Image (cartoon, helix red, strand yellow):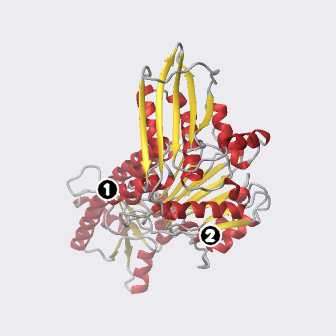
């Protein structure tokens, strides 16, 4: 907008014809076409129909004064800058301040000075041009944010578990949230859920979610343990996060039997576990670590907290934006109100009741931080379907030098506490055989065999310890204690693959350095009690494999897993 522009239009609003004539003449010399109104109501109508570039508004007029007309015009103009210069004979500060308060941009004292008018018009033109540039930049930024938001959703959130028993919400304080939710099934059908909260919020915080998502999904799909996943994420964040930026993280793994949950809480509010029947809170799992991205070595294995679950228990994960929300009366929502909302919820409406109570509490108070809430309802409908495996009838096997390939993997001493061999071995099989459809079943077999060899063979733990919740906690505490002190012992995997007609088979042999067990008697007891807590893993192996046998003193297990190739 300048004096050489074409079709510049000024609206003159004054109930005195003489004033309008004078101003019309002066504005014509500035290059403006003029339209005129005698009162505020007419001014609003002309603003709507003729879209003037600048408005000169008298204060005192019949029908509607200039104050009210300006309020309406400014409200309807929104972000589009239309300069309003008040025309007034009043010079007291209170009257001039009133012109500014209703949205006026400047004022012109009667009688008009043509040089002062010219300077004010030019000033308003410059402001209008700057406003147009700002609006253009804002539109561009807004469009780029929309594109970035879509990329973020596709890259981070799209792969999450879609199940009504996993309820989630992220309410960002700005366009982008610094909070993130990731969920995935592992090859063993465990459920992994991660809630992360980056320092701050907005685009800068959201950018960190993409590499975190990449590491989480890739390592979960390959069957790595939660502690390995967190170490991978921490290493990635240490590579690119600036100083002072970090990721509070809580990662939970719910077993496919729905009987236990492993919790890793690094700088987040406590995980709450609510009873399946009463919604009373059974456990608070507090943070016991620094957030991710702060130091190189978190010592993640020591952070694991394992608790027994009952089917139907609810896990509640949330970011501090929820408990630190404020009301109109400057009160904080707090953990006490959160827990009250959980306890008083009806049936399976815990998630909904928390959000309702938060909404009522906050009222119209502006949100200051990202608010994220997750509820995991641990019932069987949450579990993924087991990939079908067609059982092959027992056949004749040789597994000698005529086999296609062999693979041996050994872990000795403290490497048993540092390395999970199952993802390494399963990915070797996938690389050699290309049998993705068998990954889940093979992973389950290898995992059960390895856990038995490590826990009961090398570490000498008894499954009977897990017969009640107290013993369950003691079992895993003792397991970590023995692993931390482990400096001897071994577990050796040997795999041999052969082809017989249209059947392909892998002999999985796993030997541990333990004393073994009376496997003949153990198998008889398990056969008589299929619901025994400690026998479910072995029963699962026998369901999936062609055969399972024990050798030596019971410290060697041999399983044959077969699949059809035609």
> In this picture, is 465 found above or below 558?
below
> In this picture, is 131 found above or below 110?
above
| Viewer-nearest residue: 402 or 364 | 402
Q: CA distance from mark 1 to mark 2?
A: 36 Å
Label 2 packing within 10 angstroms: few (<14), some (14-19), many (20+)? some
Give me the disc on residue 132: 1
Q: Position of residue 199 (x, y in %)?
A: 42, 66
Q: Position of residue 24 (x, y in %)?
A: 31, 62
Q: Position of residue 387 (x, y in %)?
A: 61, 31
Label 1 packing within 10 angstroms: few (<14), some (14-19), many (20+)? some
| Viewer-nearest residue: 202 or 113 | 202
At x 25%, y 63%, the residue is: 126
Give me the disc on residue 461: none
| Residue hosting label 2 | 362
Q: Is residue 295 left or right of residue 470?
A: left
The answer to whether any part of residue 385 appears in the image is no
């Amino acid at each position: 907008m300048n004096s050489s522009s074409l079709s510049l239009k000024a609206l003159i609003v004054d109930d005195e014809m003489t004033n309008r004539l004078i101003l019309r003449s002066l504005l014509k010399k500035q290059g403006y076409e003029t339209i005129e109104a005698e009162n505020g109501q007419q001014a609003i109508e002309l603003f709507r129909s003729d879209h003037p570039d600048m408005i000169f508004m008298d204060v005192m007029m019949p029908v509607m004064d200039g104050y009210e007309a300006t309020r309406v015009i400014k409200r309807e103009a929104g972000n589009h800058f239309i300069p309003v210069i008040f025309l007034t004979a009043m010079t007291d500060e209170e009257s001039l301040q009133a012109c500014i308060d209703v949205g006026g941009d400047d004022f012109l004292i009667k009688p008009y000075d043509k040089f002062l008018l010219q300077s004010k018009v030019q000033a308003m033109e410059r402001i209008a041009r700057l406003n147009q540039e700002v609006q253009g930049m804002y539109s561009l930024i807004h469009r780029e944010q929309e594109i970035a938001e879509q990329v973020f959703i596709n890259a981070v959130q799209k792969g999450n578990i879609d199940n009504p028993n996993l309820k989630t919400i992220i309410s960002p304080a700005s366009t982008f949230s610094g909070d993130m939710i990731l969920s995935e099934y592992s090859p063993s059908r465990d459920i992994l859920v991660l809630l992360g909260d980056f320092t701050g919020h907005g685009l800068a915080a959201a950018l960190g979610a993409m590499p975190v998502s990449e590491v989480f999904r890739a390592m979960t799909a390959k069957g790595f343990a939660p502690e390995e996943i967190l170490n991978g994420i921490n290493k990635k964040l240490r590579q690119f996060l600036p100083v002072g930026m970090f990721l509070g993280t809580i990662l939970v793994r719910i077993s496919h039997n729905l009987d236990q949950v492993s919790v890793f809480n690094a700088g987040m509010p406590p995980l709450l576990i609510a009873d399946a029947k009463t919604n009373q809170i059974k456990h608070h799992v507090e943070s016991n670590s620094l957030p991710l991205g702060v130091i190189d070595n978190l010592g993640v294995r020591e952070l694991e907290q394992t608790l027994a679950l009952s089917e139907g228990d609810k896990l509640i994960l949330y970011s501090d934006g929820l408990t630190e929300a404020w009301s109109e009366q400057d009160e904080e929502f707090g953990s006490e109100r959160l827990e009250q909302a959980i306890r008083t919820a009806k049936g399976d409406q815990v998630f909904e009741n928390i959000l309702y109570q938060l909404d009522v509490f906050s009222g119209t108070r502006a949100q200051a931080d990202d608010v994220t809430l997750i509820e995991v309802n641990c019932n069987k409908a949450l579990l993924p379907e087991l990939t079908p495996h067609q059982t092959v009838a027992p056949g004749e096997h040789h597994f000698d030098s005529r086999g296609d390939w062999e693979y041996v993997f050994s872990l000795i001493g403290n490497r048993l506490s540092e390395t999970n061999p199952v993802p390494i071995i399963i990915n070797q099989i996938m690389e050699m055989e290309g049998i993705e459809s068998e990954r889940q079943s093979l992973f389950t077999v290898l995992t059960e065999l390895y856990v038995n060899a490590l826990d009961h063979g090398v570490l000498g733990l008894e499954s009977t310890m897990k017969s009640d919740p107290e013993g369950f906690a003691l079992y895993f505490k003792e397991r970590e204690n023995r692993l931390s002190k482990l400096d001897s012992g071994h577990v050796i995997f040997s795999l041999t693959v052969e082809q017989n007609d249209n059947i392909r088979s892998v002999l999985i042999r796993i030997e541990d350095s333990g004393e073994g067990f009376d496997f003949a008697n153990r198998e008889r007891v398990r056969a008589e009690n299929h619901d025994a807590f400690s026998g479910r893993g072995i029963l699962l192996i026998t369901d999936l494999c062609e055969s399972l046998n024990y050798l030596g003193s019971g410290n060697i297990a041999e399983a044959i897993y077969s699949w059809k190739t035609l």
